[in-house]
Amino acid sequence: MNTTESPAESPADHVADLIAAEDVLLFVNAAITATGQREFRSGAADQQLSLDFLHTYVRVNYRRVYAASLALDINHHNAALIVRRLLETAGEASPEERRTEGRLIAARLALLPPPRVYRLFGELRRAGVNNRRTRAIMRDWLAARPDLGHDAVKYRAGLKTAARHIHLPCPEGAAPLAEVGAFLFRPGRLPRYEHGLLDAWRRAHYEQGAVAELPFTVAEGFAAKHGMKREVFLKRAAPRMTRLERLRTQEQRTAADRRPNAPAAPVDLTVMPLTRLALYVLSLGFEQRAERRAELTGALRAAARRAAGAHAGSWGRVHAVLDDSFSSSGSGQKRRRPLAVALACHHLLEALAAPGAYRGLWTSGAGDALLVRPWGPTPLGMRVLDALEPGPGGAAPDRLVIVSDGWDNAPAGLAGEVLRVWRRRLDPERRTAVVHVNPVYDAEGFDVRRLAAGVATAGIRDAEDLPALVEIARFAEGRTGPAELYAYLDRRVARFTGEAEAEAEGEAEGVVVR
């Protein structure tokens, strides 16, 4: 931290620091979980209104913290919102803040999916944000794209909007950028294109054979135009599909060959991200899950081991309470998302725990994690009691992890009372670390719902972020001060922007987020 603390901090300053730290944690939880979409207990309008207030409040009062949030494991929706609002309000930042924000924005845009970045560029154009820094950021991002010809075909409207907004030069000639410019702004002027995808798009208007050469989402429209059978089209397009597109169309690609015990179309599930894989597993019927038990369980465990990384087996004895109540069904926009996070965390915690030292308890009492479904009330208190029971050898767990939306209702409030008594009377030395991770944003409370005041709580979007979120959650427990939180954010910003090595050599100053 590049701050100079006074020898004797006044009580008012200390209180202000505590409030600021609470505000930071509040915003981080929202930025991880909230997407502005409908949740089980709140509508999309409520979510958007609540999120808009938080973004405005933190940007105005803690701009450095607001920008530093880009270095954390926040979701894409909030990352794009932060980038847009930082660029819209560039006049409110000092030169030093603008330099830091520029590095953070460039690093975050490199991680965002291209469709979301192009959507963000369109929003900036409609908002009239066209300052020099914005144009430079957009030009640098476009220059770093591996193939603008591919983007011109797959994201034509987005690339065209961005090119117009920053006045991207597309000179005449045979250079790739010139062809992209002709494709976007002068269609039909060139008889053919040197770039393979651009020419495939031209030929696909009258030649069925060229359809399979295009990206899947573009090829679908041409296939419908030519009246191609869906099964034939999917078979031809399979080599050019992304991993997720293969997963989404797997059932359709095997429909034409539905023989008894016929193998499914080849999709390597072991390389899928853990939470995405859990969502896919829950989208299958019970019979399919049971028939493919070995394949699905093996894929989930492989993804969990990959997500655990260096932390695998280092958490000691771990007990988990996992919420599969009816509210874990999510909403029409986020179907089964809370349950998928719980299922993914179940397998990740198994990988993080010492061998044979993991115990997972579902609120419904289910004993088969692969066949869980959203059902029944949320008796968190009863399951927490069971989880705190000593394991083999009479030893209490080293960690208790609760994955739930926090709506403890059978009976209401029992989980918080159990945890309060446990912490105060039975485990005052805190031998058992208790962490509650919540995948659902509570729009009314501007935060994720908490079980008890003394329990560390963090929002969670993807189970893969669990080890990092446990580190953030300890700041909410009240045992560490604001200075430690700000130092943690400084380290994350330095690592995210690649400045850690330069800072160690004294070539760059650290980023102060207070």
Image (cartoon, rainbow, N blue to C red):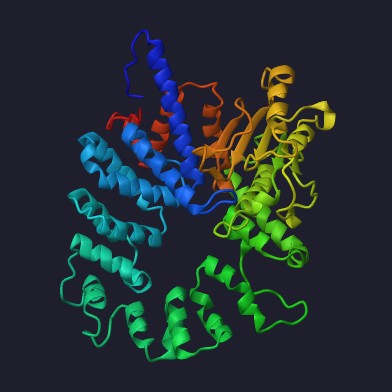
Q: Quadrant of residue 335?
A: bottom right
Decide: is 2 above or below 67: above
471 vs 503, nearest the viewer: 471
Q: Is residue 224 left or right of residue 63?
A: right
Q: Is residue 409 left or right of residue 150?
A: right
86 vs 480, nearest the viewer: 86
Q: Is residue 194 left or right of residue 347?
A: left
Question: Where does residue 247 sit, x and y in percent of width and height?
Answer: 59, 68
Question: Where does residue 62 sit, x and y in percent of width and height?
Answer: 34, 32
Tell me the residue at 32%/49% (across/down).
Answer: 84
Image quarter in which the N terminus is found = top left
Tell me the residue at 23%/70% (across/down).
Answer: 177
Decide: is 360 above or below 128: above
Question: Where does residue 82 sit, x and y in percent of width and height?
Answer: 36, 45
Q: Quadrant of residue 127?
A: bottom left
**Residue placed farthest to the right in the image?**
393
Tell me the residue at 77%/32% (across/down).
Answer: 385
Image quarter in which the C terminus is found = top left
